[in-house]
Amino acid sequence: MSRIIQPRRAIAMAVVCTLAVAAPAAAHVGVKSYSPKRASTVSRSLERAAVTFKGRITDGKLTVRNADGDKVSIGDGRVVNHKLTIRVRLKDGLSRGRYTASWRALHTDGHVNGRSWTFNLN
């Protein structure tokens, strides 16, 4: 009978270890929305860019660059909306073209991640 119990214990321990390792990764919050939306075309009167998360973050940075790689955002953005959003102001008079917004966020569990998205000004 002990031979049957040993494999069950081993399986149970493997499951517990897997869940213990996966739990911190599951704690990171995902992106709820981008503004402007990913791959969208928007008016040239755009004043801000933002990324909103499904849960709170501790800190973050958001920058926007034009197709030449020049920074068109003012500063590095601010965490607002009860620590759910990183928002940054954009320079006045942006020209038509493709822009890339890049963010980095410090999650409440200490993990840092980031991504980027593009949009077009018309």
Image (cartoon, rainbow, N blue to C red):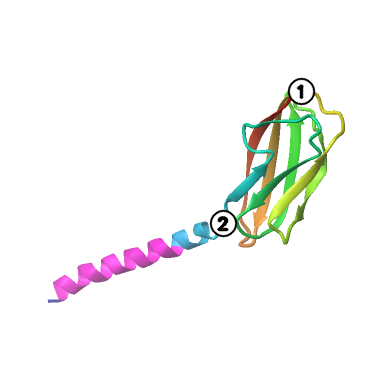
Dot 2 falls on a residue whose secondary structure is loop
- Please state if 31 lies on the left or on the right of 63 as rendered: left
Mark 1 or 2 closer to N-term?
Answer: 2
Magenta region, residue range: 2-20
- Would you say the magenta stretch is mainly helix, strand or loop? helix
The secondary element bearing badge 1 is classed as loop
Q: Position of residue 94 (x, y in %)?
A: 82, 28
Q: Quadrant of residue 37?
A: top right
Taking the magenta stretch, the answer to whether it contains residue 4 is: yes
Q: Does the magenta stretch include residue 114?
A: no
- The residue tagged 1 is 96
In front of the other: 9 or 92: 92
CA distance for labels 1 and 2: 35 Å
Q: Do the residues labelled 1 and 2 touch (CB within 8 Å)?
A: no
Amino acid type, residue under disc 1 in the picture: Arg
Q: Relative to 55, say whether 100 is above or below.
A: above
Query: Residue at 62% across / 36% down in the picture?
Result: 38
Q: Nearer the viewer, mark 1 or mark 2?
A: 1
Q: Image point 75% across, 36% down: which residue? A: 64
Q: How crowded is mark 2: few (under 14 residues within 10 Å), some or many (20 or more)?
A: many
Relative to 19, 71 lies left or right: right
The residue identified by callout 2 is 28
For the C terminus, which image quadrant? top right
Q: How crowded is mark 1: few (under 14 residues within 10 Å), some or many (20 or more)?
A: some
Amino acid on which the number 2 mark rests in the picture: His
Q: Where is residue 25 in the image (x, y as percent from the top left)?
A: 51, 57
Rendered view: 45 above or below 11: above
98 relative to 49, above or below: above
